[in-house]
Image (cartoon, rainbow, N blue to C red):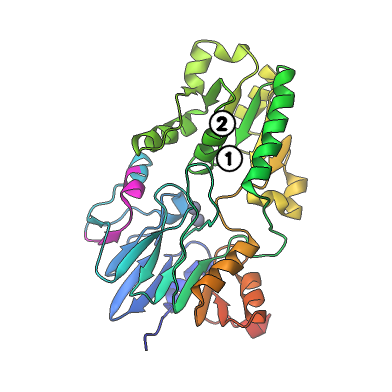
Amino acid sequence: MKILFIDSKLSKSLAMMSGNGIIIKHNGKNIALDPTKSTDADVVFVSHAHMDHLHIPSNGENILTSHETVKIANTRGYHMLNVKESLDGFEMIDSGHILGSRGLLIDNEIFYTGDVCTRNRAFLQGAKIPKCDTLILESTYGKSEFKFPSIKKITENVNKIISDLYSKGIPIILIGYPLGKAQILTSMFKHWGPIYLHDSVYEMNHVYNELGIDLGNSISYSEAEEYNSLSKKPWLMVAPRMNSKSKFVTEMKNRYDAVTIGFTGWSLANWYRYSSSLDYVLPLSDHCDFEELISIVKICDPSKVYTFHGYSIELSIELNKLGYDAEPLIRQNYRLSDF
Ligand SMILES: [Zn+2]
Ligand SMILES: [Zn+2]
């Protein structure tokens, strides 16, 4: 029987969201899952290129990750050496979260999802979920209030909003984080030309294009300003999620009467409704919703589930009700009975 240890020091750090990811000991090897600092683990797994999963590695680390993640990380200033795309006993499985994102299946027993999304979106296929004995499951939206509408429904809603605004000559800014969401938005709505990209989005779209994802020809915000293109309305822009009081969005609204549409799963949370001053917000996410997380557990059919990120406690409680042995990875001295 293999035992999974959650290193006490590290799991305590995880509770503070500032430590060094999850460590598992398996067959005498230390495996670091998405560490945020350099580590002397035998194998380091980097699931994808979002900042909360990247670290500046020391030279000696054996890093397991996808070539897409290496390239995207490079663009963001994280240079990984000693990178492998395969290693005996380890299988990387597409996690459907962003381009290049992977989960990790260890000896066909332990499956770490990384950030995961099981629904198809634009050019991304949903994650394929393997059977396993121990599941380490991302639980960002692990609460039943998070039930996302279908992609078809969201697409129809947004096309309708854009169509109405376009008929009045009003420009629109689609807002989502610059790596991942912005490329999905570009792909889904680029037929509404002309489309301009905030410079941070432009840079990431360029990397996606180089990796074989055709996001069409778009123009950067800087270029558009240079040629005074924005005064010809309407237009569509993709910009990163920013504070609604941020200078960029305020300026776009003041100068061009632009309307903002935000895209985030958090739009279903009560607290979000009161704090967001976007004109529209839709629950388009690169993560699973609650039911999709439960489905992952059913497909894996594991004897043990560890949840991490977001609503890890809430999801564990629900999974226990369904008869699974689940616990959140928060801190070592945590017990479900404490809650
Ligand atoms: Zn992510
Ligand atoms: Zn993440």
Callout 1: helix, strand or loop?
Answer: loop
> Is 52 on the left-hand or right-hand side of 236?
left
Q: Which residue is mark 2?
A: 238
> In which quadrant of the rendered view does residue 21 lie?
bottom left
Q: Which of marks 2 and 1 precedes in the sequence?
A: 1
Q: Amino acid at mark 1?
A: Gly
Q: Which mark, by number, is residue 176? A: 1
- The residues colored magenta run 60-71
**Ligand 1 under 8 Å from disc 2 Cβ:** no
> What residue is shown at x 45% (from left), y 27% (from top)?
216
> Is 24 on the left-hand or right-hand side of 333?
left
Q: Position of residue 235 (x, y in %)?
A: 61, 20
258 lies above or below 3 = above
Q: Position of residue 174 (x, y in %)?
A: 61, 33
Q: Position of residue 98 (x, y in %)?
A: 46, 48
Q: Is residue 39 visible?
A: no
> Is 212 on the left-hand or right-hand side of 177?
left
